[in-house]
Image (cartoon, grey):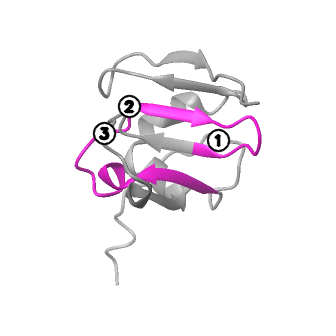
């Protein structure tokens, strides 16, 4: 009954709704790897929060809410103002996010 009362409240800074769908890899979802690579897609505004590994297949990608992403790693709040068409990566949690412009798709 009281266990929900004591759950940690996570800060949420994004302008998007908490229930907006985001792409994560199963490594992030299962918390076996950290979020090290983030993109904010120019075409549809889709957020992706990935481990940065190159060993992914289509079946590795999952949809979860932005609120769930923040519950996994609250430090991604640092990217709440990242514009469309950009991404950021880092070497490890706590390291500085390094922004980059995504290549334009023709």
Circle 1: element type: loop
Q: Which residue is mark 2?
A: 36
Q: Quadrant of the N terminus?
A: bottom left
Sequence order check, earlier mark of 1 and 3: 1
What residue is at 41 percent from the left and 15 percent from the top? 96
| Apparent side of residue 3 relative to residue 81 in the rendered image (left or right) | left
Percent x, y for residue 47?
60, 44
Q: Nearer the viewer, mark 1 or mark 2?
A: 2
Among the 4 quarters of the image, the one containing residue 17: bottom right
**Residue 66 shows in the view:** no
Q: Quick check: marks 3 and 2 in contact, CB under 8 Å?
A: yes
Q: Residues within 10 Å of mark 2 (few under 14, many from 20)?
A: many
Q: CA distance from mark 1 to mark 3?
A: 20 Å
Q: Which residue is mark 3?
A: 34
Q: Quick check: marks 1 and 2 in contact, CB under 8 Å?
A: no
Q: Residues within 10 Å of mark 1 (few under 14, many from 20)?
A: some
Circle 2: element type: loop
Q: CA distance from mark 1 to mark 2?
A: 18 Å
Among the 4 quarters of the image, the one containing residue 50: top left
């Amino acid at each position: 009954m009281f266990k929900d009362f004591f759950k940690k409240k996570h800060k949420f800074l994004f302008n998007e709704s908490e229930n907006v769908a985001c792409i994560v890899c199963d490594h992030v979802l299962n918390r076996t790897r950290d979020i090290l690579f983030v993109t904010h897609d120019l075409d549809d505004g889709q957020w992706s929060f990935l481990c940065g590994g190159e060993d992914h297949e289509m079946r590795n990608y999952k949809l979860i809410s932005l609120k769930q992403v923040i519950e996994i790693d609250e430090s991604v709040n640092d990217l709440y103002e990242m514009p469309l068409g950009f991404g950021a990566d880092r070497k490890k949690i706590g390291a500085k996010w390094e922004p980059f412009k995504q290549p334009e798709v023709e």
